[in-house]
Image (spheres, rainbow, N blue to C red):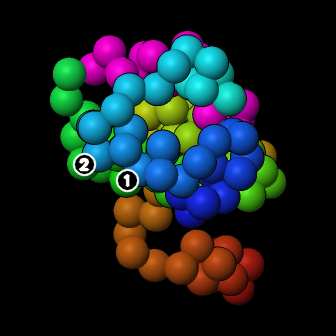
Amino acid sequence: MTLAELAERSESHVGNLSRIERGLARPSLELLHRLALALDLSLTDIFSVAERKQLDSEQVALNAAFISLIEEDRQLLLDFAELLQRRSTQSLSDVSVGQDSLPANKTGTDPTENESEKTSE
């Protein structure tokens, strides 16, 4: 989203948002509310980011990418993030594909070869 698009969505002016972006002006609470609505965020989201003294560059990049996505893609990204969070709290033995656990093929052979050998004996 460009600054001009954000200005239009938040009923503000590009110059005003540019001064805020460069730290030359501070937004009113009213403008913060309109910006939050324009970005599909809550004021809580905006203030929680502002409370952090330093944002790492990866977080800033992720936030910028998220804001620029269309709504469907934002939801897809949120769903993927939830999946990653669940995966990080599971033990590897609980990870499965479909309904079956992942096979542990310790011999390095194709499991179907073992089956064909058993049936030919």
Q: Is residue 41 visible?
A: no
Amino acid at circle 1: Ala
- Up-down relation of residue 77 to residue 88 (above or below): below
Disc assigned to residue 86 = none
Using the rendered view, name the quadrant where residue 4 is placed. Answer: bottom right
SS assignment for the magenta stretch, majority: helix
Residue ID for mark 1: 61
Mark 2 and mark 1 in contact? Answer it, CB < 8 Å: yes
Amino acid at circle 2: Ser
Query: 3 or 36, which is in the foreground?
Result: 3
Image quadrant containing the C terminus: bottom right
Percent of width and height locating residue 82: 60, 35
Query: 80 or 90, which is in the foreground?
Result: 80
Disc assigned to residue 57 = 2
10 Å crowding of disc 2: few (<14), some (14-19), many (20+)? few
Dot 1 falls on a residue whose secondary structure is: helix
Image quadrant containing the N terminus: bottom right
Query: 59 or 6, which is in the foreground?
Result: 6
In the displayed structure image, the side of residue 87 where residue 60 appears, left or right: left
Residue at the spot 29% in from the left edge and 46% down from the top edge: 22
Residue 69 painted magenta: no
Percent of width and height locating residue 70: 74, 58
Query: 93 or 22, which is in the foreground?
Result: 22
Using the rendered view, name the quadrant where residue 25 is placed. Answer: top left
Separation of disc 2 and disc 1 at Cα? Answer: 6 Å
In the displayed structure image, the side of residue 81 where residue 37 appears, left or right: right
Residue at the spot 63% in from the left edge and 18% down from the top edge: 30
Dot 2 falls on a residue whose secondary structure is: helix
Percent of width and height locating residue 64: 47, 52
* Numbered marks: total: 2
Which stretch appears magenta?
Answer: 35-52
